[in-house]
Amino acid sequence: MSFAFAVCLAAVFGLAAIGTPIGYSLLAAATLYLAIDGADLALAAEQLIQSIYDGYTLLAVPLFIIAANIMNAGTVSQRLLTFCVAVVGRFRGGMGHVNILSSLIFSGMSGSAVADAAGIGKIITEMMIKTGHYSRGYAAAVTAASATIGPIIPPSIPMVMYALISNQSIGYLFLAGILPGLLMGLVLMTMNWTISWRRKTPVEPPTPLRDAPGITIRAFPALMMPVILLSGIYGGATTPTEAAAIAALYALLLAVGLYRSIGLREFYRVVVESARQSATVGIVIGCALIFNYIVATERIPEALSHQMDALEISPVMFLMAMNLLILGLGCLLDATTIILVVLPLFVPTAQVLGIDLVHFGVVMVVNSMLGLITPPYGMLLFVINAVTGIPLRDIIVNVLPFLGALLTALLLLTIFPDISLIVPRYFGYMG
């Protein structure tokens, strides 16, 4: 590692530590590296523009963002919640199960944990509190924990980012996230049932059976979005980016044409907010690509690969070590930074050790999502705190059992690659 790169790393973490947005931290550090190394400072701008221009797959990110925002702005979320109440609301811990199931369904539309938590998560948190059977902190904790499923089940913005840095198929990565996402939902529901049983939480009145067909029909168009999205990709009709555009158009047609829940003024607000969020993500991605260029110039991945090869570390040991590293970094950094800045250092090593890169990507994305509910950073904890006003301390105390359940799911995913790979292999993946 050169002196210039050491200074670059110190600048990234130092600026991030004092609250500088991570995109600007990366840009400043990259510029500092080029200055110390004696390179042309215009190289940073050239790398940014060239990487973004060539990154066709990156168009999926703003399209998934606007699709999620349209869903949140209209009555789609409420219809989905009513459907979830009818399906699982009758069991012990029913509203907690509704919370988790709604995240599983909504994750097939947004691909963003923050979008889930800020949109449908706020609604279900208030619903749980109003029953009088759940504390405010517990309701918020279930919402935060279940929102981590959003970027695992397709579509997934973090999976798109991982595909960018690993050169893997977005389609197969999406498929690989289906069973892990369902596993995460299962362990969360099990933990919710266990806690509700211990606390003797009252069972909610079941939805009358005669109402079920009407509820299902009203929610059916929204439930079809993941089906349309995935069938387009895996049927060969669309690329993932084109599927994202169809998802955004379909969300708009539902909200404006079918449900008539968004007017012109509301649509303008959605577009502006989506543009703002997309610009924020775009700055981080662009600056991370400059940083990755520097990492490649320093030949850091090759050095790490040679070192791991010399140590004769097994693939399982490497994955366990990576889990500990990413979990630790997740306490301090956001998931986007981890995926775009940290993982490119280790992807070549994983490949040398014979680890399937689709499996590696799923494990690392799941791991980085757990960082969203891990103190002290825990972005989802702050999001839930901001949209509900529930004290952060209450949320953290109640989220710890759910974090433990998700760590169990992560361990299973690490040890048993088939959990992530069985579905992609069924659709022709040869890895």
Image: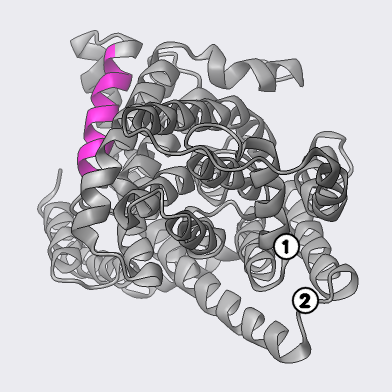
User: Which residue is tagged 2?
Assistant: 261
At a point 22% along the width and 55% down the height, the residue shown is: 394
Q: Is residue 146 above or below residue 51?
A: above
The answer to which of 331 and 297 lies nearer the viewer is 331
Q: Residue furthest bottom?
A: 265
Q: Total label count?
A: 2
**Of 194 and 228, which appears nearest the observer?**
194
| Residue 123 visible, this orientation | yes
Q: Say which quadrant the N terminus sits in.
A: top left
Does 222 appear above or below 93?
below
Instruction: Give how far across and how far down residue 165 sits, in percent.
Output: 48, 44
Q: Are marks 1 and 2 in contact (CB under 8 Å)?
A: yes
Q: Residue at x 64, y 62 (%)?
A: 68
Could you say where residue 75 lies in the image, as x and y percent from the top left? 72, 68
Closer to us: 95 or 49 = 95
Query: Could you classify mark 1 by the number of other residues whose Cα lies within 10 Å: few (under 14), some (14-19), or many (20 or more)?
Result: many
- Looking at the rendered structure, the secondary structure element under dot 2 is loop
**Residue behind mark 1:** 76
The tag earlier along the polypeptide, 1 or 2, is 1
Q: Amino acid at mark 1?
A: Val
Residue range (magenta): 317-329
Q: Quadrant of residue 7?
A: bottom left
Residue 53 within the segment the image draws in magenta: no
Image coordinates for residue 114, horizontal then vertical, percent: 46, 59
